[in-house]
Amino acid sequence: MYSHGSESLIKQAREIQEPELQKFHSRLGKLLQGKELGHETVDSLQRLHLILSATKYTRALPPELQKRVQSLLSSPAEQFQVLSSAVLRETLPLSDQKENYIQENTSQLNSHVAALLLSQAGSRADVTSLCAQLLRSLESRQSEGPANSLTHTLPILNTILTHSPECLTEDHVTLLSKKLVDWLRYASITQGGSTSSGGFFTGPRSRQPVPTAELDGTVSGDFFTVLCVGQGFTEDQWMNVYSFSMLRHWLLTYHFVSNGNSTADTAHRLQLSLSFSLSHSFSNDFFLSLDLSFLTSRVADDRSEVDGSVVSMVSATSSSSRLLPPKERVREKAFQYCQRLIEQSDRKAHKRTDTDLQKACLVEAVCILDCVCEEDASLVYRTFPCIKALFGRLSSDLSFARVLLPIAQFYLNHGEMAAVDCESVWKLVFDRFPAELFNDHFLAHELLRFLRLNLESLQLRVPQYTRSFPNLLKFLAWDSPAVVDDFVDLLPSLVTAGTAVELLHTLLDLPCLSATLVLQVRSTSLPISEPGGRGLLSLDAFRSPSFRGLFLFLLRGEAGAGDTIDRLSTLHELLAETANWPRVVQCAQTVPMLLHIFFNTVITVADEKLLAHLVLVMLERSSLLLNIPKYNKEIHRVFSSHLLRLCKLHPSLVVDQSHELLEFAGATANVYNKEEIYTHAVWVLGEYLSVSCDSRCSVSLITSCFEALEAVLFEITSSAPPPGADCPAPRVVTTLMSALAKLASRSHDLIPRVSLFLSKLRTVTRGGPVAWCSDEEDLVAIVMRGEELWSLLKAPGVAQSVLTPPPHVTTPQWHRDTNVAMPLRLRALTNLTHSH
């Protein structure tokens, strides 16, 4: 919403009359004729922009005024460049003037002109025309245009390539490939600008060309790259930088022009390239690679001392490469350029920013080599020795973790072809990275992105992946909100028949893992004892050798050490004070959703034996959870819904796990503290403990189940709840009654026993309030349910048909089928019976 003052200005701008507007145009034109443009000109341009943008209709400026506003695009003051660009974006040129308009603006190209040209390209033809003009400007000599125009051309072309690659023709690709080769490989090797320190003794010798230097201060002995430094750069050196920053994007997309690949395929190729995000903003000197922005500060601040001697070039382009077609040649030069960068990255940089620049360039170089090898498989054998040596040099230093991920991508893509051993790479990625860098947010994002983009390949080629979930989940335990979306995608791939049970335990223990990671970080930063202060009991336990095994199991790096530990209750007691830590609470909030994903996946990969084991785990772990507010109830709710689902899919699970289910349902304490899962456990016993579901179901099994449930129901309805506990929920009581009635309908000898209980229940409640139900309405509902069941059991044959109907009766569910008339008739009858 706008403020009152802003709304007033917008209203005035919309309601301005044509005569007044013409006067304003005339006054602004006179202001722009002046030699000096002051505050009044700025205010007038701002008002003009408001007038043009306040209405949905496009207004046309007088031709003379439009030319004067357009001339401000090349003003030395950026304020006028911004204002004129904003004004012109609201006034599209006439269609017959577009060609001249593009020509005039490409001749004075800067970032604001670039934004203007792209915003006013209303069709593919406009983009194609703009692209042709820009490419023609690349062919012109440096002296024919402004010195800075070329440095803005490549980023615009890169933006066009991103959004409309089909606008480039084969000739455009050939031309741009040739120019990229020239800029990448043949840029000047001497520093740009004046290298003289000035003063009285300035002479011819001090103005001699000075070669560029390496980051360690030595004179460059090879061709220029982004890792060469100096007191100033020439234009072709800047173009070298810009060419490198868009090189990978070019290699990934130029095939769309010649081969006619789909846009989706191009997008897929871009997505599979592990990289830093590309920026197409025109406000940051057109740098396309995020981490290459280090170069700007490096050029602005660097004043390295360079040896005055000139070293001859030691590398020369082979004559055979000059005979290659343009695309193959740019691929070859990209290969040479990246090899040179990898060699330069081994030099000791003098500044921290230069070290960061080396890492950024290494990432980009490895990614480009990956692209090159994808296009030309013969280069794999030339590239792997270099990549292998680079991995050997960096693998021991985890500060290069973000560089090692693209190396892992290279091994994944080409390791099988080159027949190299990748074991050490995956040990680093899946073992050391999560174990030691779980609190590195950038690495977490990039590693999880690497896993998501290569999920299918990792499942097929890297057996360590599915076994590494205890380590990978450390990222989730440490910073759940930031990475939970990644694990929503990754978790199904980690669920296998071999890992399902241990993975379920690990998910339930995620809050414990979160607390343990916090303790691990604190143990290295806090003193062992704090005089005069109260220490954390959990931290003392973490440092104690007696409990070290519990925490080491949580911090294990690979699956297979065991599904869980015996002393979980002890662990929960030690971590009790961590239950309200924000990091632990956030982690606990993600577990229910992940459990839903786990169970939805496991039913597709598990057999009945494994599912029976999972039912047992759910029953056991329902009482072994870290005591976090609302956490236990949420987990019980998830368990209950999936227990019901598993038993519905495989009714025989109830007979397989009947002993455990009866033991769980026969414990009266579960009525009060596990209402959700207890209710569903009782329901599945009453519903599926039947010969029709499993032929192994015997009369003795039905009788033992009946007796266990009968004892619980009698106990909770004949005494007050334990101290500190609420009255049993009405749903628990009615579910127990229904389960007893179902079991009795299958074994008629039990009908008198349940009928006697139901009749006593009706008699007891007539005497007034009871201790086990505090709400009168709930008590009435329980009694009504009891009377319904008692009435049904008077006719055993009818009771069995109603309480346990055969499948052919329940399967159609005509009352729910919207394709038949039954639902409509039922609704009509309902409306009639409820009408006044």
Image (cartoon, rainbow, N blue to C red):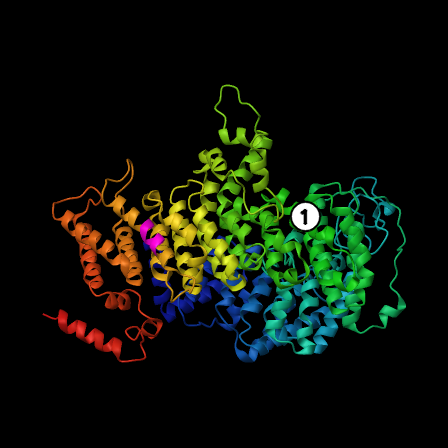
Q: Quadrant of the C terminus?
A: bottom left
The x and y percentages for residue 60 are 46, 72
User: Which element carries disc 1, helix, strand or loop?
Assistant: helix
Residue behind mark 1: 401
Front one among 26 and 370: 370
Question: Which residue is the extreme one toward the top?
Answer: 532
Residue type for callout 1 = Ala
Q: Quadrant of residue 269?
A: bottom right
- Residue lying at the far left in this picture: please name it: 836
- Choose top left, top right, bottom left or bottom right for residue 806: bottom left
Query: Picture coordinates of residue 754 (x, y %)?
Result: 24, 55
Q: Nearer the viewer, residue 52 or 739?
A: 739
* Residue 63 vs residue 487, the one in the foreground: 487
Return the x and y of residue 229 as percentages of the image width and height: 76, 49
Identify the residue shown where x is 53% and y is 22%: 530
> Which segment did they paint magenta?
703-708
- Residue 758, given in percent of the width and then of the height, sits at 20, 53
Q: Above or below — where is 585 with respect to 693?
A: above
Please indicate, yes or no, whether residue 224 appears anywhere in the rendered image.
no
Residue at 85 percent across and 43 percent down: it is 307
Q: Is residue 227 toward the left or the right of residue 683 in the image?
A: right
Image quadrant in which the N terminus is located: bottom left
